[in-house]
Image (cartoon, grey):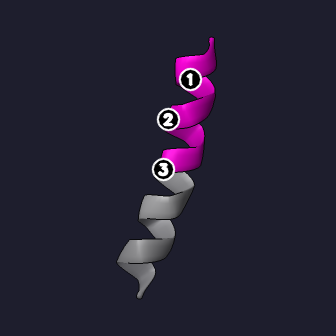
């Protein structure tokens, strides 16, 4: 579903933000 794709992208962004 579209929501699943958004969650995956959001997780990548959050991971990058946490890395900083």
Residue receiving disc 1: 4
Image location (x, y in percent) of residue 10: 49, 48
The segment highlighted magenta reads 1-10
Mark 3 residue element: helix
Badge 2 vs badge 1, beta-carbon distance below 8 Å:
yes
Mark 2 residue element: helix
Disc marking residue 12: none
* 17 left or right, relative to 2: left
Q: CA distance from mark 3 to mark 2?
A: 6 Å
The residue at 51%/61% (across/down) is 13
* 19 left or right, relative to 3: left
Q: Earlier in the sequence, mark 3 or mark 1?
A: 1
Q: CA distance from mark 2 to mark 1?
A: 5 Å
Q: Residue furthest bottom?
A: 20
| 19 up-or-down from 5: above or below | below
Disc marking residue 11: 3
Crowdedness of circle 2 by 10 Å Cα count: few (<14), some, many (20+)? few
Residue receiving disc 2: 7
């Amino acid at each position: 579903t579209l929501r699943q794709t958004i969650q995956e992208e959001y997780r990548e962004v959050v991971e990058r933000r946490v890395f900083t």
